[in-house]
Image (cartoon, helix red, strand yellow):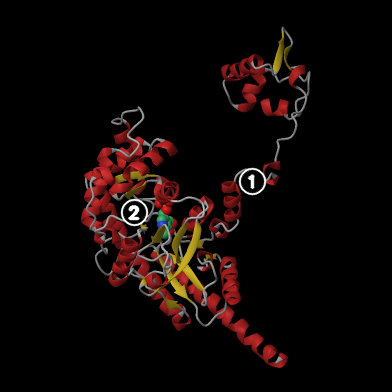
Amino acid sequence: MKSAILGGRLVAGARLPPTRALAEELGLSRITVLTAYEQLRAEGYIVGRVGSGSYVSKSHAAPMPPRRTAAKSIAPLTRYARRARQLADWSIAAQHCDRRLDMQYGRPQVNPTLGAIWGRELAWAATRTRLEYGNNQGLPALREQICDYVARRRGIRASPDQVLIVSGTQQAITLTSRVLLDEGDEVAIEEPHYFSAWQQFGAHGASLLAIPTDHEGLVCSALPKQAPRLVMVTPSHQFPAGPALSLSRRQELLRYARSRDCWIVEDDYDGELRYDSSPLPALRSLDGDDRVIYVGTFSKVMFGALRLGYMVLPEALCDDFINAKYLCDRGNPAIEQAALAHFMEDGGFERHLRYMTRELNARRRELIAGLQQYAGDRVQIADAHAGMHVTVWLPDYDHAQVDALIADAHERGLGLYSIAPHYRTAPAVPGLILGYCGLSKAQLHEAMQLFGECLDAVDAAARESLPTRRQQV
Ligand SMILES: Cc1ncc(COP(=O)(O)O)c(C=O)c1O
């Protein structure tokens, strides 16, 4: 009724329906309607006339001016807003097509019982968590669990004092920018790279250098002679192309950082999920010089909506990062942290991880088998031993053909995604990132069958256009 009065649909002096009739019509108790009318009266929207009912009051009857929708057209007020606006134009989310068989990378969780388990952990934690502001560095119990976990699974030795709980990798990058970068400072980042990292550093005003990668990960010899302020890498599983950073390159990178006094950010987004061997130790585990800022996230191994991650910080940087976190948000929600600490402590987290690894491995195998069966040698499968996606290259096709393939697949209910947005300059060979986390084995088989049909269609179109091209020549 309020919006009807403000919007002019109920005009000044209009009579409101009697409360009894309205209660019946809406299936509400009369008391509810009387209370609502009383509230409208108290706020001055309506007036009561004894014995005659309620009427729209004169003072509120004029329609409100339309909501200002001009915000988009104002000039950005800060340099940050300007840069962020430019970067937002390339949003990868815009690619999202939500097809029946959607292979978007990063679709969450494969453990169907996780939701129920997590609900119980939250309920448990809610009754045990103190409700005043918590420790802005993160719940000590969670930091201890993380230290124990990264020591066993990622080979990292650190004390809980070096751990900072953050809202995922995104916030880790924001804090890193605030603490380590002034506008114009250089950041070296892999090519291809995690698009959001590029966006975040770019919005902060960093000057970004795209450093090539190959089958051994970052090509360290391509790093500039004059060191950037920091180098951002995904050593366990180069994102999105796939390879792990080789041992010799790891050593080269650490030597580079030491000799040139620069920092390394290790984004270990899915390092736990390795299928044909044990997880590889983190780069941070080799770091004798305390230069690697290690970033872990629960987005992949739990679910993205959790928004919990952690940083293992070089000792020299701890105070500045903890201050930055305090200034940013005073710390992450305590109940979620307590629930996660408990889940880790009683072994539930690693049971879930074992389940997830088995299940994802089965899906990955299904995907690869489907690719071999239906796409054959028309695709090259990149290093596919880890994570939640497989990257494939299509060397026999050009970019326009692969765009047509994606569009055709979308029409047929198959969501395919190009690797191109993760590059600054389009790769020589077109490629696709096939996320297999959100589809069952049967769905993956069907998806690959459809993929093969889409490739057939592109091949047929190429054959048809061949004579025409020849005629033109
Ligand atoms: C390379 C990379 N790093 C980190 C993340 C996770 O980010 P967050 O922890 O903010 O969810 C992702 C998720 O897609 C990713 O692809």
Q: Amino acid at mark 1?
A: Pro
Q: Is the residue marked by circle 2 packed among few (<14), some (14-19), or many (20+) residues within 10 Å?
A: many
Q: Quadrant of the C terminus?
A: bottom right
Q: Is the residue marked by circle 1 packed among few (<14), some (14-19), or many (20+) residues within 10 Å?
A: some
The percent position of residue 437, horizontal first and vertical second, equals 40, 60
Q: Is residue 419 visible?
A: yes
> Mark 1 vs ligand 1: CB under 8 Å?
no
Please name the residue that numbered disc 2 is placed on. Answer: 293
Q: Quadrant of the N terminus?
A: top right
Q: Are marks 2 and 1 in contact (CB under 8 Å)?
A: no
The percent position of residue 293, horizontal first and vertical second, equals 34, 54
Q: Is residue 120 visible?
A: no
Residue at 24% x, 45% y: name it: 145
Whole-Å distance between the Cαs marked 2 and 1?
32 Å
Q: Amino acid at mark 2?
A: Ile
Which residue is nearer to you in this view: 217 or 229? 229
* Disc 1, SS: loop
Quadrant of the rendered image containing residue 468: bottom right
In the drawing, does residue 452 fall left or right of residue 137? right
User: Which dot marks residue 222?
Assistant: none
Quadrant of the rendered image containing residue 335: top left
Residue at 24% x, 57% y: name it: 153
Determine whether 396 is above or below 272 in the image.
below
Residue at 68% x, 92% y: name it: 470
Numbered label tally = 2
Residue at 72% x, 20% y: name it: 16
The percent position of residue 127, horizontal first and vertical second, equals 30, 30
Please name the residue that numbered disc 1 is placed on. Answer: 76
Nearer-N-terminus badge (2/1):
1
Determine whether 339 is above or below 46 in the image.
below
